[in-house]
Image (cartoon, helix red, strand yellow):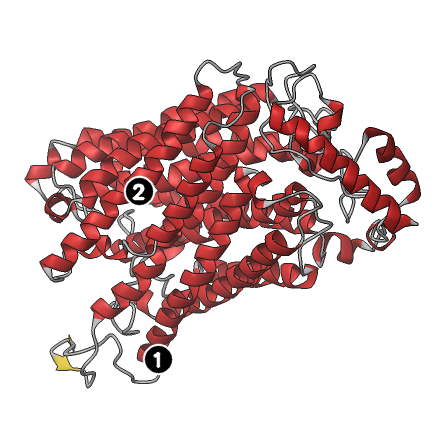
Amino acid sequence: MATADIHITEETHHDGHEHDHDHHGNFWTTYVFSTDHKMIAKQFLITGIFWALIGGTLSVIFRLQLGFPEAELGWLKPVLGGWITPDGKLDPEFYLALVTMHGTIMVFFVLTAGLSGTFANFLIPLQIGARDMASGFMNMLSYWFFFASSVIMFISLFIETGPASGGWVIYPPLSALPQAVNGSGLGMTLWLVAMALFIVSSLLGGINYISTVINLRTKGMSFAKLPLSIWALFLTAVIGLLSFPVLFSAALLLIFDRSFGTSFYLSDIYINGEALPNQGGSPILFQHLFWFLGHPEVYIVLLPALGITSEVIATNSRKPIFGYKAMVGSILFIAILSFVVWAHHMFVSGMNPFLGSVFMLLTLIIAVPSAVKVFNYLTTLWRGNIRFTPAMLFSIGLVSFFISGGLTGIHLGNSAIDIQLHDTYFVVAHFHLVMGSASFFGMLAGIYHWFPKMFGRMMDAKLGYIHFWLTFVGVYLVFFPMHYIGIAGYPRRYYSFTNYDAFNSFSDLNMLVSIAAILTLAAQFIFIFNFFYSMYRGRKASANPWQSNTLEWTTPVEPGHGNWPGEIPTVYRWPYDYSKPGAKEDYIPQHIPFSMTPESNLPHENDMIKLEGDETKVVVDEKK
């Protein structure tokens, strides 16, 4: 549209939606059973924060056991009850339950629902120029299925026989036989029910995200003009839609084995010398089904964090993102390859060596698009006019973890090395850095960056800096020593290493890891205070505090249901016009026509001005 027509359009034309959306319902329809994507995003976020505290607390409890195996833990008895033995030690069976629930909570309830659920819901309509999701009701259902799943999983922590204790991968036969251990009983049943509801939530959300991006983009918002955050969230939804049903089927077959006498995963099992009737099943089948979701799951949590990082780094470097098309291509390539590398988790399962070599090759190839992303981040940062906001620091921290954790992934992708390192602390350190910590830092970067748009207020930057440095240093102190003790042969999931002379020499490193884990968890309470205090008492935000180009900053400071009170802006340019030579300012938002920036237009952009005139004529004719 030409400049002169923009004001006319805003005054004389509305698309009829603002009257539908700018209403004020009662408490229940506004805050509880809301269909507003922004409110649903906040519900996912606050629920995810709750789960992050639970998951972090569980990890500190079992790190106390690992770092101080001789310590008396009777002081935890008021919290853990019977799971503290009479002599003040942590019950060994409960230790395995702690490890299981920590992994489940952090992977699914924090990094999947808390990260993707929050930012896909919040950013997709705002950044593509849509009033809301394609289906507000389905969006609401996706949260409430997640909430129901959360309630059931939380209840399982308090049952008498304890929560699920088969490891977060719940391999049979331990998970398929209710009589195997205490945690294989009711706790495992509740785990399976909670995960079934969680998968339904993820599928409802994924269908909505994909439909919204494809169908509800505003005028001018082609796929070539989408922010990288939307590309990442869109392809994450595609991965989830294709892979989560496989986990659902795996869990369903496991329920059949547990409750209906089938033998999908069981064969030739003896318990206390008594042979069970199950014949013909294979626990390896479950591994294939689980990891077909399990490895795409790595990118389900990592890609949204990388998309957020792309947005934050470009905005705070005041430079166009380097290699936009290469970044989109790398996300697409990662999405495709993530489905054909799952068996690198199974090199020790007895698979055919030739098949193992195929998965090894594909695993090493997936390092290429990951390296492209890292190279482009570093090149965007290079000689940029960098603003070190808390969000920027957490984004740079993500890049650091992605590099250091990714390099160890190359070792584990090689089957000859992986067979030696499998199920050691080296593996734990690798995936906690490249998946867990990197994704968590991406989530924190997104919260700090979009908090002003979520709540209309600013988080305290000084507290943000303290939070970053304590967490960044703490994470490396936790997981860097783990690589070393993993190479030395420390196996994961062991309750205690004091009975093994070979491992006693590393007790000081284990203690360091535990102390660092406790301090890192403590640092998160700085963030919790900053988050909730700033929500009500923080400095009021301006409309575009980061001087960013994307469409969400064209809405009011606290947008109502419907996002834009008038007409949705038309998009003319890509989202990364930062520090453009000749421009009056160092940013040009996506909705600014080329006719308004003749001083900075490139030759092909001047040609676009003619199209603006044609578009204006069409709009005027439609109004007549």
Is the residue 255 above or below the residue 53 in the image? below
Q: Nearer the viewer, residue 234 or 70?
A: 234
Residue at the image point whose x is 67% and y is 24% from the top: 588
Tell me residue 597's x, y (percent): 71, 22
Q: Examine the rendering and report whether any part of residue 391 can be seen.
A: no
Mark on residue 166?
none
Looking at the picture, which amino acid does disc 1 mark?
Phe
Image quadrant where residue 514 sits: top left
Looking at the picture, which amino acid does disc 2 mark?
Phe
Image quadrant where residue 602 sits: top right
Horizontally, is 562 left or right of 301 in the view? right
Q: Nearer the viewer, residue 421 or 521?
A: 421
Mark on residue 256?
1
User: Looking at the image, which residue sits at the far left?
Assistant: 501
Q: Examine the rendering and report whether any part of residue 563 can be seen.
A: yes
Horizontally, is 157 left or right of 100 in the view? right
On-image quarter of the N terminus: top right
Residue at the image point whose x is 29% and y is 61% from the top: 166
Mark on residue 431?
2
Q: Residues within 10 Å of mark 1 (few under 14, many from 20)?
A: some
Mark 1 residue element: helix
Is the residue 578 above or below the residue 51 in the image? above
Tell me residue 372's x, y (percent): 36, 34
